[in-house]
Amino acid sequence: MTAESQIDKKNEVPKVVEYRLLFLGSHHKASLFDKLCSAVDRFERHPQYKDIWYLETVVDDVPCMIELNDPGMAHTGAREMSIRKADAAILCYSCLSVGSFHELSSIADDFKAGKKNGKSKATQSRPKPIKLICNEDEVVEDDLDGDQCSSEGYESGEDMSKLRRRRRSMEKIVEAHDNERITDEQGEDMAKLFGPDCEFISISVSKFTTVGARTLIEDLIRSVNYLNPNKLKPLQKGRRSKSKDPKRRESMSNHNSVTSSSSSSDGFSTTTIVEPYDAPSVPNLPSNPPSPTKVKDKFKKRAHAVSSVCTIS
């Protein structure tokens, strides 16, 4: 690799801004995942890791690559690392599933800065926007058992069909309304456990539109950019350096120049390069311009002097 190519690679303008989005919750979030995928321009699964998806979209004229990671609810090193590296998080539970509610509340401490090797991680951690979403749909499955808390995978439409919600009997729905329904107040209290940047949202995922899902993604991206201004600095710096590139300015100058050709009577053709036209600068006007009457009198005097000089005897 030559020195010039190394410089070009170093000064290369990043084409997209990458974001890490953590997606946690019980299996009730499967339908929300579908809505998020339908709201972006393009999405695809990681070729090796089934719990990682890539979503491509544009927010405020900035191309964004979102790495959506679902490490599962099991307490593992992968989940801890995903929480630590995430730029934002979406947490989802069902208002009719007490188990899904308690699963999320049990991991709130993992989002707080703790100690590692005797040193505080408060300086290492950074604020991250969190959306705590309560699914109000009454069509849900029974709670998962304790050993069924892995990531969902979202491998294919066929596999997703197995995760579709099963309608409860009317007796179970009535019983859930009377005894098990999680109130909005409980959801707001749990949001406080995740910190000041956690927002509680109660929605019906089945009625959640594509526009609503896109607004949710854009809100998270803007919040990340606000809480972490350094996120956009490489892209902004690259765009400024690209606009100041002398080679780029020279190419633009050559592009704006005009070439004209003409043929003389002796058969030879001549080529003339016309430089880009630069508009003359406007002179500074006096601060106190003369009145129209004075200008008119001055013009009359000049006209009289010219007429007297040009008189034919």
Image (cartoon, rainbow, N blue to C red):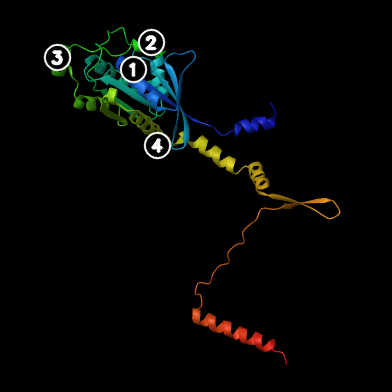
- When the figure is inspected, residue 240 is found, relative to residue 64, above or below; the finding is below
Q: Are marks 3 and 1 in contact (CB under 8 Å)?
A: no
Instruction: Verify CB contact (< 8 Å) between mark 2 and mark 3.
Output: no
Q: Is residue 311 above or below residue 100?
A: below
Q: Position of residue 59 (x, y in %)?
A: 43, 34
Q: Tag 3 or tag 2, which sits nearer the N-term?
A: 2
Query: How far from the left and from the top, in percent, is residue 75?
Result: 35, 13
Q: Which residue is mark 2?
A: 159
Counting from the top left corner in percent of width and height, residue 144 is at 27, 10
Upstream in sequence: badge 4 or badge 3? 3
Which of labels 2 and 3 is toward the front? 2
Give the amino acid type for the residue marked by disc 2 in the picture: Asp
Q: Which circle marks residue 30 in the picture?
A: 1
SS label for mark 2: helix
Q: Which residue is mark 4?
A: 226
Q: Are marks 4 and 3 in contact (CB under 8 Å)?
A: no
Left-right relation of 206 to 184 = right
Question: Residue 84 is drawn in which quadrant?
Answer: top left
